Image (cartoon, helix red, strand yellow):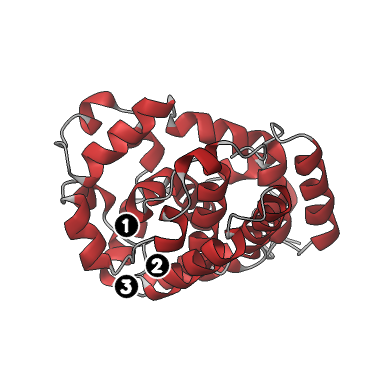
Amino acid sequence: MTMDAAVYPDEFEVLKPRRMRPVTAFRAFQRLIRDKEDTAQVFEIMRALTGKSDAVGYDRLLKTAEGGRQAFLRDELALKLDDPEWLGRFGPGTVGGEYRAFREARGFTAEGLAEAGRDVSPEIEAQHPVMWYTRRLRDIHDIWHVLTGYETDALGEACVVGFSYGQTNSLGFGFIGWGAAREIQRENRSIPARRAVWQAWRNGRKAQWLPGLDYEALFAEPLETARARLGIRPATIYAAVPAADRNALKLRA
């Protein structure tokens, strides 16, 4: 061992992918079903089932021209998304304008979502490129709501994580989406939750790869133009479920 290694023993540590922990994920999902307000369990499931998907996603980012540029710049999206002056630059009908309206209607902030995840996975704040990519996926979650058209009711959340599974191949998204769909159909058999989540997954697979986008440029685009350019297909099964039925679900988003 060199002197440097003795003084800084972690400096040369080889980082390994997170071990898959399906039992932990299953238990966290059971706790979530018992207490629908315990959203920390969502992050516990993601932590248990992420595996190598974030590292694979970061490698994919580097293989595209724009993704590589984003990795080089390494902007923290949460800081921009919570800057009212920056967000106020985008007019009505643009992706940025629709995102602003989406979060104002719900009282959401990017930091609020970040804080909830940080309590479960403090390592997400590490100064490491893969952790930066993980933060990026967290911060664009609500933007994907706007792009896909899924609302924040329980079915909409199940669908947007299904879409996210199609984009990222992270099993945590797939587990939450399919588990939520099962619980929704147990509560109301008339709601085609499994079909809606399946369509969301297919739409995620068929769309352009969204993690590597220049989101500042995207925010300036008209929403419908962006959807067409990115190949984001309409959420027809979800949209066919009456809003009253979706909002009446006891399973919380």
Q: Residue furthest front?
A: 190
Q: Which residue is mark 3?
A: 64
Q: Quadrant of residue 69?
A: bottom left
Residue at screen point 82% across, 47% down: 30
Q: Give the Cα distance between marks 2 and 1.
A: 8 Å
Return the residue at label 2: 61
Q: Residue at 59% across / 58% down in the picture?
A: 193
Identify the residue shown where x is 48% and y is 64%. 200
Which residue type does callout 3 highlight?
A: Thr
Q: Nearer the viewer, residue 4 or 143?
A: 143
State yes or no: discs 3 and 2 in contact (Cβ < 8 Å): yes
Measured as percent of width and height from the top left, residue 150 is found at: 43, 50
Look at the numbered discs 2 and 1 and tell me whether their residues touch, using CB distance below 8 Å.
yes
194 left or right of 81 in image: right
Q: Disc 1 or 3, which lies upstream in sequence?
A: 3
Residue plotted at (37% across, 68% down): 209
